[in-house]
Amino acid sequence: MVEGEEELIRTSVSEVLGEQEAVRESLIPILLRVQEKLSYLPPLAMELIAGALQIPAVDVFGLATFYNQFRLHPPGKYQLQVCMGTACYMVGGKIALDCFERRLGINEGETTPDREFSLERVACVGCCTLAPVVVVNEEVEGRVTPTRVDGILIAFGKKIQPSTGVGEKKGDDGS
Amino acid sequence: MSKQVSISIDGRTITAPEGEKLLWVALENGIYIPNLCAMKEKSHPSGSCRLCYVQVEGRAEPVTSCTLPVTEGLSVQTRSPQVDRLVKSAFELLLSNHRLGCGRCPRRKTCELLKMAKERGLKMKLFHLEPLEWPVEIDDSPKTFAFDRSRCLLCGRCVWICQEVAKVGALGFTGRGIDRRVGTFQELSLAESPCTECGLCIDPCPSGALYFKESK
């Protein structure tokens, strides 16, 4: 959590709770409003909401993990959206996603601890001729091969360890 | 008290309080209907395990007995080709997401799946489906019990007990679809969750996912 964030979460949640009736049925609108303000749902916010509605925190968490609409990780400075539409998937969208995951050390849907990069999968972004496509903060990057993945990351200031080849063979490509 | 009605299950005439769910009437009269997610005290049956189907006279399709209130003159058969087929499919789906290994399972004597298989002549084997092989993940952080998610059938009995009987609210359903699981807030271990280790959730578990450590 960055400095001053706890304060921001507390004020945002209490503002939203002031607007909505504190009953279980309002849980979705409350979560949506809180997410609008904070751009994600931090654990503290979910706990505060659960406390106010007098429901178990796990129920709020369960709902937030059920709907794709809710994000549990803050958006990074650079939001990477990897297209998994049919065309992109067929020409290696999954490989691009795997490369990002490995390079950034996070899974799909997560954010790096320094909040520089967040990684998501999206459905078709509408430019299948450029497949596989990655959208970085609304900018479209086409033909994203694993090398291009490194290129994108380097362009945004990510330091990439040169590959040594040692201990990477096994399971990587099955060769 | 509510009015008594007479109904017929597999040709046997039974009197039962009107509005009682058929599943409980049958079980209390020694007629077995497979079930997992049903709990008598629960106000709304979740009807999610799709195992308790019966054939009701006058209805084309089988009906889940946990949601069927008994009425005067109701006549049902617990078995029919349609029912057997539905139960077989539901059973195989559950089995495909359940790590077998009955020899070392703490519930091997009281397992609901084994009981169902015995009663309905089902095999503890997959015919049409590949097993979903999740990495075995056992949360043994509580002092007295442990939770093996690879045996969990998602019946929701422990969740209901935890929230409505124990009034703790440590367990809940998280995720969606194939990632659905019984979890805790932020997927923390039970010891880090609000769990009070009351142990009420252990006995209702039908499949040995939750078990006391010494019983292993």
Image (cartoon, grey):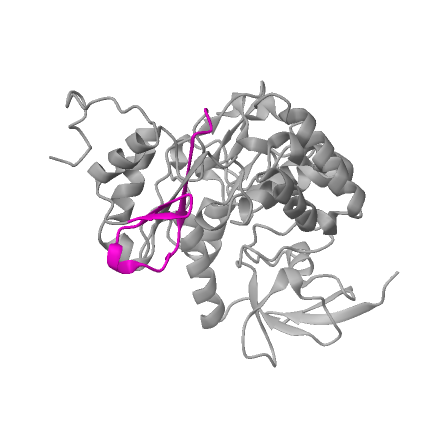
**Residue B167 visible to the viewer:** no
Left or right, B134 with respect to B58, comes to left
Where residue A96 sits, quadrant-wise, is top left
B23 drawn magenta: no
Left or right, A21 with respect to B159, comes to right
Residue A45 image offset from top left, x and y in percent = 66, 34
Residue B52 image offset from top left, x and y in percent = 56, 60
Query: In which quadrant will I find the N terminus of chain A?
Result: top right
Residue farthest along the bottom direction in this orientation: B58
For the magenta stretch, what is the residue range? A114-141
Where residue B18 sits, quadrant-wise, is bottom right
Residue A54 image offset from top left, x and y in percent = 77, 38
User: Image point 66% across, 25% down: which residue?
Assistant: A6
User: Image point 31% across, 36% down: which residue?
Assistant: A100
User: Image point 46% across, 44% down: which residue?
Assistant: B179
Residue B106, relative to residue A71: is it above or below? above
Residue B182 image offset from top left, x and y in percent = 54, 39
Q: Nearer the viewer, residue B53 or A13?
A: A13
Where residue B72 sits, quadrant-wise, is bottom right
Q: Nearer the viewer, residue A72 or B191?
A: A72
Q: Nearer the viewer, residue B216 or A34?
A: A34
**Residue B45 visible to the viewer:** yes
Q: Nearer the viewer, residue A98 or B97?
A: A98
A140 drawn magenta: yes
Residue A164, relative to residue B123: is it above or below? above
Query: In which quadrant will I find the C terminus of chain A?
Result: top left
Left or right, B144 with respect to A135, comes to right
Residue B104, relative to residue A109: is it above or below? above
Residue farthest along the top direction in this orientation: B143
